Amino acid sequence: MSAVFRAMTNSANLKHGISLWRHPSSFINRSSRTTVAFTGAQRRAFIAASAAFSNENREYVIVGGGNSAGYAARTFVEHGMADGRLCIVTKEAFAPYERPALTKAYLFPLDKKPARLPGFHTCVGSGGDRQTPEWYKEHGIEVLYQDPVTDIDVQTNTLTTSSGKLLKFGSLIIATGCSAARFPEKIGGNLPGVHYIRDVADADSLISSLENAKKVVVIGGGYIGMEVAAATVGWKLDTTVIFPENHLMPRLFTPFLARRYEELYQENGVKFLKGALINKLEAGHDGRVAAVRLENGSIVEADTVIVGIGAKPSVSPFEELGLNAAVGGLQVDSLFRTSVPSIFAIGDVAAFPLKMYNRIARVEHVDHARKSAQHCVKALLSAQTHPYDYLPYFYSRVFEYEGSSRRVWWQFFGDNVGETVVVGNFDPKIATFWIDSGRLKGVFLESGSPEEFALLPLLARGQPAVDKVKLQNASSVESALEIARSSLQEKSAV
Ligand SMILES: Cc1cc2nc3c(=O)[nH]c(=O)nc-3n(C[C@H](O)[C@H](O)[C@H](O)COP(=O)(O)OP(=O)(O)OC[C@H]3O[C@@H](n4cnc5c(N)ncnc54)[C@H](O)[C@@H]3O)c2cc1C
């Protein structure tokens, strides 16, 4: 099984080799229509009542104002169903934005043109209109800022917000994402100078620490750790990355691939402490973090610590809709319906059937946030009933600031199962192919051309039979990709 998905998979179901997800018998309204909220008369009453958002009735409510909410709002607009009908309730002070920017261009050194809002409001990541707060106003969408939902009554379809507002909804989409996993307070997890990054407020707080920082410790060797470390050496700060595994990005990278990236980071001044466990974050005399104590007793000095140890789905206060015990999150079907008619969940918080690999997954990536939002809203507003069929896709971009000695941009599509074949010397390209039972299951590419990156999803989706020896003997990444492409053509010719 894929390491990437192991933690996110319902192993009990896999063991029995059955379809990975079924509704419990009491789980859902099994009507074939996907719009489940209203009778015609009720719908008209709701539209009339909610048109000016003047009372507590709302036709459509999205809880959460992140990536998936932004793309959901765009899909409502495209269907002509937003104006006077859609309300977004969010915890943050900002309209939805492209969250991945927070550990990339947002953290560029201050003299290297860092990204700031409104530059990365959704949907810039996929080439749409930039959805600033004005965009929502112009499209008649109500956005309630800094007012998280604290309670839901599924009998009366009513939400309560922290300010005490009551919102009765016709249909509800839960898009609450994740929150960063934290170290407990008793080991120093809340000390001043210890940072977690999930939103703009977190990133601003980190930047104010970096302005006075000298020694930075990054805890975690995954996405957040890699991206933050690439940023802090750009700020010319002494940077140490500490993680318990043997190499960077252990859930996706092979040891060989990780080594290439680790060498690049080291050339840029990053130090690694691998296989290390944290015992405590220690405070100095001023109460700020001053050091990281490891389980082996050694101490690493630090005036700023960034913790990137994973994220937890934000399911509260919606637990009663049905949690998936194995992967976490709210369980939905292939149209993003929860156990309660007219309530949906999308993005990071949704545990959905990953059709391609016949298992349940939760995917914490922006591509799924966008696509799940679009699929869910289309299913809600139209007669679309085809199941969501997602192809896993991950990417990262680092060292992109002006003056960096080299930029890094990789993409991965598919499933990282089976044996691997690596081609290329990372100068700048390197590719890795995952082959299982003779078929190409996953493919990774660093520094590809747009045409080469465009080939990857076709390969991962097509899963052609490939000649492993031919791939191993390929003289370059280009020729390896050509071999894979021709396997795909041979497959379609059969
Ligand atoms: C720093 C960082 C870097 C990332 N980089 C990448 C990357 O390079 N590539 C990639 O593919 N993915 C990346 N991701 C993951 C990607 O950003 C997420 O998968 C995506 O944002 C998920 O969208 P979402 O709408 O489900 O959740 P989010 O975008 O997290 O939005 C959830 C929103 O709901 C709000 N909320 C939560 N609870 C409530 C409540 N009760 N009431 C109201 N509002 C609530 C939150 O405050 C937040 O605004 C990154 C994530 C982070 C944090």
Image: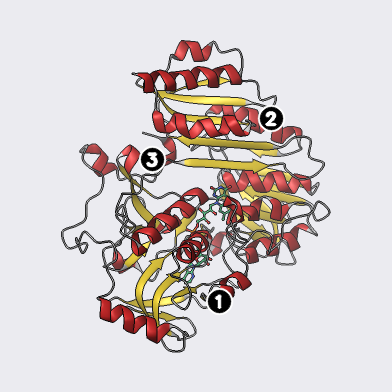
- SS for dot 2: helix
Tell me if residue 440 comes above or below residue 367 in the rendering.
above
- SS for dot 3: helix
Question: 97 left or right of 321?
Answer: right
What residue type is disc 3 on?
Arg
Q: Residue furthest front?
A: 80
How dense is the environment of label 1, judged by Cα within 10 Å: few (below 14), some, or many (20 and up)? some
Q: Which residue is mark 1?
A: 146
What residue type is disc 1 on?
Gln
**Viewer-side label of 3, 1:** 1
Q: Which residue is mark 2?
A: 263
Tally the numbered discs: 3
- SS for dot 1: loop
**Residue at 26%, 81% in the rendered image:** 41
Tell me if residue 156 comes above or below residue 66 in the rendering.
below
**Which mark, by number, is residue 20?**
none
Where residue 303 appears, as percent x and y from the top left, is 74, 56
Q: Are marks 3 and 2 in contact (CB under 8 Å)?
A: no
Where residue 275 appears, as percent x and y from the top left, is 56, 37
Which quarter of the rendering shows the C terminus?
A: top left
Q: Which residue is mark 3?
A: 6
Where residue 349 appears, as percent x and y from the top left, is 42, 58
Of the residues under marks 3 and 1, which one precedes in the sequence? 3
Q: Residue furthest left?
A: 25
